[in-house]
Image (spheres, helix red, strand yellow):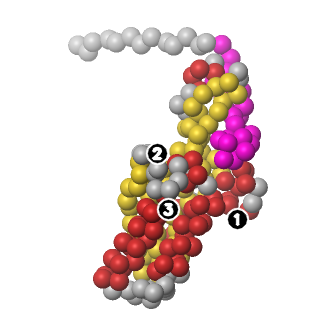
Amino acid sequence: MAKKTTTKLKTRKGKKKWFPVKAPKIYKNKDLPQVTGYEPAELVGRMIMINMKEITGSGRDSNTRAKFEIVKVQGDTAMTESRGFFVNDAQVSRVGRKAVTRIESVFYVNDKNGTKIKFKILLGSKNNISRVVQHEVRMLSEASIEKAVKKMDAESVFTVESIKKFSTEIKKLSKPIYPINDAIIWKASIV
């Protein structure tokens, strides 16, 4: 005969409340969407994904998202730090359709404070490229990102401006080897 198990019901702590959330200093402490919780202390460690259009106000940034972690609560206001930057997969697949050669790369870089950051990049060209040239372009792009990130801290890596700067730098440096049409920093996050 099967053994009966009993489950204990969790008691509720009361009604949930809405807590305001602030972006990091690099985004001028802008207001982010509010989060719910029973008490402020349980918000610490919670991750929030936000469309960058809500922070920057620019329609060009609607295909990117930022990941924030609540690190402390001051009064009832939750303060965050940047933990990642992501381009929507739909945007990446559109680039893949028009590009004949797709060069993908995943690698790790330490910033100036020693924080380990994982990058996933996508490079695309309109013509077929040999494997040797693909390897050279991949190594060149990884080296250029590593060189730039070693001079920055993790907070400043996850801004729209720095991600765009990485992309334009990759295009510029790869021109002598082979011209790249699209250079997308697909994902960048703290490991």
| Label disc, if present, on residue 148 of the rendered structure | 3
Where 11 sits versus 43, above or below? above
Q: CA distance from mark 1 to mark 3?
A: 24 Å
Q: Closer to the observer: label 1 or label 2?
A: 2
Tell whether 134 sits left or right of 179: left
Tell whether 78 sits left or right of 99: right
Spot occupied by residue 155 in the image (x, y as percentages of width and height): 57, 47
Amino acid type at mark 1: Arg
Q: Is disc 2 placed on a helix, strand or loop? A: loop
Dot placed on the residue nearer the N-terminal end, 1 or 3: 1
For the residue carrying disc 1, how many other residues have a C-alpha within 10 Å: few (<14), some (14-19), or many (20+)?
few
Q: Is disc 3 placed on a helix, strand or loop? A: helix
Spot occupied by residue 45 in the image (x, y as percentages of width and height): 53, 31
Q: Return the residue nearer the eye: 108 or 121.
A: 108
Q: Is disc 1 placed on a helix, strand or loop? A: helix
Q: Is residue 16 magenta?
A: yes
| Label disc, if present, on residue 128 of the rendered structure | none
Q: Is residue 56 magenta?
A: no
Name the residue: 62% across, 37% down. Answer: 80
Task: Indicate the quadrant where residue 81 lies.
Answer: top right
Amino acid type at mark 2: Asn
Name the residue beneath numbered marker 2. Answer: 113
Name the residue: 46% across, 80% down. Answer: 174
Dot placed on the residue nearer the N-terminal end, 1 or 2: 1
Residue 22 appears in the figure: yes
Dot placed on the residue nearer the N-terminal end, 2 or 3: 2
Spot occupied by residue 140 in the image (x, y as percentages of width and height): 40, 73
